[in-house]
Image (cartoon, grey):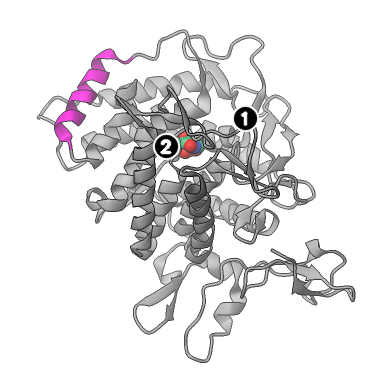
Amino acid sequence: MGAVFKRACLVILGNNTEFEKSVMWLSENLTFDVDARINLFECNIRLLGGLVSAHILATDSTNRFTQGTYNNQLLVLAQDLGQRFLPAFDTPTGLPYAWINLKYGVMENETTETSTSGCGSLILEMGALSRLTGDARFEQAALNALHKLWGMRSSLNLLGTTLDIATGEWIEYSSGIGAGVDSFYEYLIKAHILFGKEEFWRMFQSAYLAVQKYFRYGSWYHEADMRTGRATYWQLTSLQAFWPGVQVLVGDVAAANLTHREFFHVWKKFGVLPERYLLDHQIVHPTEKYYPLRPELAESTYYLYQATKDPWYMEVGEAIVNSLNLHTKVEGGFASVKDVTTMQLEDHQHSFFLAETCKYLYLLFDDSPLVGRNYIFTTEGHPLPVLSDWHETLPDAYTPRNLTSIKINTPKNQASAMSMQVCPANLLNPRHDGQDIESVCHVPDTRDDHRCLTDDDCGIDSTNCRRRSCSMAGYCGLWLFV
Ligand code: DMJ
């Protein structure tokens, strides 16, 4: 199965001979007709995404293959896999089971518990499969699940982490931007980019603003209860490091940079990123001390470098590569770190190490495979081309003419449509010297007259990104200590 993960990497590396060989090997040896209980989300992002992406790369205009050898074998495999996913969606809510058996479908007494990312991160792969095969069932199933999930958001536009697919009730109300939720946010914005649907943008915009308002604390993001917005867990998780990459996609580069720097600081402290770090006690979580070669920090570094071309991000990439070589390189591959405080290793290299960690680090230093091309990466690092054929008319919020150009000598800075939403005040009142700052953290006070009962009624100051507090006189004014 390793070949499924390596294929897009081979194209990025420019090794078309090995790419062709591995595609042919898969065509002859891969079958999904096996009695195996698989996780729908993981199988979707790793296998279906890998097959669909490699099929597109095998059939694009670069003619990588010896003539006549590729006859859509990967697409046939992808379609077979997609059909095996469909029984998972046959539930009272349309939300899919987390686990299915590839041969027999949903097993008796299967758990009905799943996660937000498990239901909300299917649309890219299943949508692409529908567009390629003409069979609308895949995209429809993923879309129904996403609509149902979005309908379960609270009045604060927050979602929980785990839920029951039979009842459509939340199980875990606390959530953040990390484990169990992360790729849900990522897929809203990427689905908008890939399919150009306005509804994805609208969902993303509401969800993004809620994250900034209820989870963000300075450069960090804590967890909060979806019903009240009150902070629950003050923890940094390694998975959260993908967030700056998403922020780059919407143009909120300054905020992305701030958070990215904090993650890199923790990386330097340990040599890698611990899975969970307790922000309030400044210690590694006692039972989550591992680093399974995750890609998120490298991924965000790649996006930030692409957005800014600031060589500092290449230095970050170099530091990551050096750490990986120093601490995790073993004979035959790279090993996960079991305990970041002792650097004890374990005999495991996840597929995302090649599909993502190595790919983003490689692209940081050589992005020539993507220059002049318009791709998005799925959450597992599989490239999908943005095709006009797959696009609905782009909404105003996304079209380049709607970007606001701000002159800072030369070159120009651009504030994204999202920034305009988040901080209109800054754009309306340029500084005297003609410069302007893109303030991406601004969250307005709940009431226009700035009156408040508690700190929660106050937003985030646009100039210093600090949360405002409610004064004894009942006005939002001073800042909370960050
Ligand atoms: C990857 O499998 C995907 O990026 C997923 O969305 C969550 N993170 C892992 C790797 O850490």
> SS at mark 2?
loop
Sequence order check: which comes first, mark 1 or mark 2? 1
In the image as oriented, which residue stretches furthest toward the left? 67
On screen, residue 473 above or below 356: below
- Residues drawn in magenta: 15-30
Q: Amino acid at mark 2?
A: Glu
Residue 140 lies, in percent from the top left, at 51, 34
Q: Residues within 10 Å of mark 2 (few under 14, many from 20)?
A: many
Residue at the image position 39 percent from the left and 54 percent from the top: 316
Foreground residue, 382 or 68? 382
Relative horizontal placement of residue 241, taking residue 451 as reference (left or right): left
Residue 329 lies, in percent from the top left, at 34, 32
Residue 410 lies, in percent from the top left, at 34, 81
Foreground residue, 469 or 88? 469
In the image as oriented, which residue stretches furthest toward the front? 342
> SS at mark 1?
loop
State the residue position of label 1: 95
Residue 344 lies, in percent from the top left, at 48, 29
Q: Quadrant of the C terminus?
A: bottom right
Can I make out residue 73 in this image?
yes
Foreground residue, 234 or 416? 234
State the residue position of label 2: 380
Ligand 1 neighbours mark 2 (CB distance < 8 Å) = yes
Q: Which disc is residue 73 wearing? A: none
Foreground residue, 101 or 413? 413
